[in-house]
Image (cartoon, grey):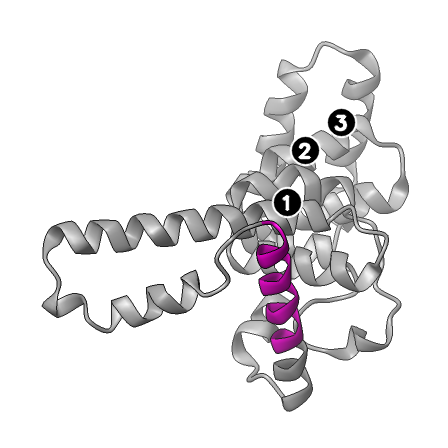
């Protein structure tokens, strides 16, 4: 899915969808007391970087860092929305910006399936949270291993293993990673789940 997304140009429907989400994010920022034009201001400042002094450049970067922090907080909050569209788009943006702090919240909803009408869009696959975890990469690994230790749900385990396989891109590395987790684990039930995950590696594949 991720390779497809990276190689695919946005069609008009995707562009319109992203514009809508951007407007919703700006509305959320406005309603929470955040300056909705700060990001545009940052872009304007970037265009004049060459004319700035070091102090002004540092202030510009600090302003953007504050904007990104606020955006991350809003997107994480939206993951628990009762509106599936809000959750899916929030998961998508958390993956695009590769926020490490999003790994655990995304892993907790990894099996939430997108059955909505926009599922054909190239922004994400059938499981938006799984797609986001794949984009985040290595910071997702502890969270999905946690799923394999804690969950007996077959779909959660399948998708978590798919994320590991995607990130490692090598079955032997994934196996070593799970064996390390198994060696460190003291809980017999969690050990059993990890052993089952290791045994399922030859058949594991991305949904």
Using the numbered discs, state the Cα–Cα distance from disc 2 to disc 3 in whole angstroms. 6 Å
The residues tagged by marks 1 and 3 sit, at their Cα atoms, a distance apart of 13 Å
| Image: magenta residue range | 18-32
Q: Are marks 1 and 2 in contact (CB under 8 Å)?
A: yes
Vertical comparison of 117 with 139: above or below: below
Q: Is residue 25 above or below residue 166?
A: below
At label 1, counting other C-alpha atoms closer than 10 Å, the crowd grade (few under 14, some 14-19, many 20 or more) is many
Farthest top residue in view: 186
Q: Which residue is mark 2?
A: 145
Q: Nearer the viewer, residue 109 or 75?
A: 75
Q: Which residue is mark 1?
A: 164
**CA gap, disc 1 to disc 2?**
8 Å
The residue identified by callout 3 is 149
The image shows residue 137 at horizontal and vertical percentages of 54, 49
The rendered magenta stretch, by its main secondary structure, is classed as: helix
Looking at the image, is mark 1 or mark 2 earlier in the sequence?
Answer: 2
């Amino acid at each position: 899915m991720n390779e497809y997304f990276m190689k695919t140009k946005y069609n008009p429907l995707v562009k319109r969808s992203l514009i809508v989400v951007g407007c919703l994010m700006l509305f959320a920022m406005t309603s929470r007391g955040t300056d909705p034009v700060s990001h545009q201001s940052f872009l304007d400042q970037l265009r004049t970087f060459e004319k700035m002094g070091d102090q002004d450049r540092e202030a510009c970067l600090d302003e953007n860092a504050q904007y990104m922090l606020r955006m991350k907080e809003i997107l994480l909050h939206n993951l628990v929305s009762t509106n599936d569209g809000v959750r899916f788009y929030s998961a998508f943006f958390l993956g695009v910006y590769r926020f490490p702090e999003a790994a655990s919240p995304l892993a907790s909803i990894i099996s939430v399936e997108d059955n909505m009408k926009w599922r054909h869009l190239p922004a994400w696959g059938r499981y938006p949270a799984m797609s986001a975890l794949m984009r985040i990469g290595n910071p997702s690994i502890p969270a999905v291993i946690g799923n394999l230790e804690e969950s007996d749900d077959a779909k959660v385990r399948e998708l978590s293993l798919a994320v590991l396989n995607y990130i490692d891109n090598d079955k032997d590395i994934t196996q070593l990673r799970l064996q390390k987790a198994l060696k460190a684990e003291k809980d017999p039930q969690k050990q059993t789940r990890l052993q089952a995950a290791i045994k399922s590696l030859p058949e594991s594949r991305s949904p």
